[in-house]
Image: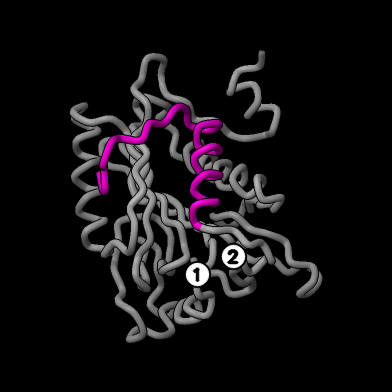
Amino acid sequence: MKSREDIAAQAGFSTFFPAAGSAPVEWIVSEGLTAYEEALEAMERRAAAIADGSLPECVWLLEHPPLYTAGTSARPEDLIAPDRFAVFETGRGGQYTYHGPGQRVAYVMLDLKRRRQDVRAFVAALESWVIATLDRFNVKGERREDRVGVWVRRPEKAEGAEDKIAAIGIRLKRWVSFHGISLNVEPELEHFSGIVPCGVTQHGVTSLVDLGLPVSMDDADLALKAAFEEIFGETIRPANALRP
């Protein structure tokens, strides 16, 4: 029987498994909308506990109210509508992005010392996770060397047209990651018009529902969890956990 590593490698995915004997990654899903300030505080606290060895690694799935975040490379001119939604400066990499209802945000708190202290390989593994998730809906997600995130071709729009379906932005502290990915399930795509998403002007944004797929958030969560385990290893749902 093939191992998870063999299956993932055969599919062309970049794996990022922990050292043997590591505890499963806690998989937490929050209902409703979580304020960005609360999420940032919880992530900082959990990442510190992971670095100290007092708590296991964690992935936290949630939705935010409509807001914009600015990464460390954000350019002021890319914030087109500064008064539309709250704007938060973050310590993650990248530029401006949008979060809001209908978008699944997955905050990824992993200890790279237990895996690989290789940031480039970690980002590639996050991209592989999203691509493997999309594959479960027969959507071909692709990575690009000149821009972070996961993209889908839109030939029905125009020759060479592409739309972004997932954003990736991370930060490391003591080799523990936080922030993570956002997958567009069914957000209000017009809300992206208040920024230049990730500084890219020549391409648009899309979602699973925009692509004509009747995917619910629960459907997306199941696909994300299965794909995560192929790329990063075992998970466990802690009882009654609402946040890290």
| Residue 206 visible from this viewpoint | yes
Q: Quadrant of the C terminus?
A: top left
Identify the residue at horizontal 66%, vertical 50% (top origin). 137
Q: Amino acid at mark 2?
A: Ser
Foreground residue among 229 and 146 = 229
Helix, strand, or loop for circle 2? loop
- Labels 2 and 1: the sequence-earlier one: 1
Judge whether 5 appears above or below 187 on screen. Answer: above
Judge whether 187 appears above or below 30 on screen. Answer: below
- Residues under numbered marks 2 and 1 in contact, where contact means CB atoms less than 8 Å apart: yes
Measuring from the top left, give residue 125's x and y in whole percent: 53, 38
Judge whether 191 appears above or below 230 on screen. Answer: below
Q: How many marks?
A: 2
Give the extent of the magenta segment. 217-244
Q: Which mark is residue 187?
A: 1
Q: Badge 2: how crowded within 10 Å, few (<14), some, or many (20+)?
A: many
Measuring from the top left, give residue 79's x and y in whole percent: 41, 79
Q: Which mark is residue 207?
A: 2
109 within the magenta span = no
Q: Which mark is residue 12?
A: none
In this image, 200 relative to 22: left or right?
A: right
Q: Badge 1: how crowded within 10 Å, few (<14), some, or many (20+)?
A: many
State the colouring used for the structure image. one colour
CA–CA distance between discs 2 and 1?
7 Å
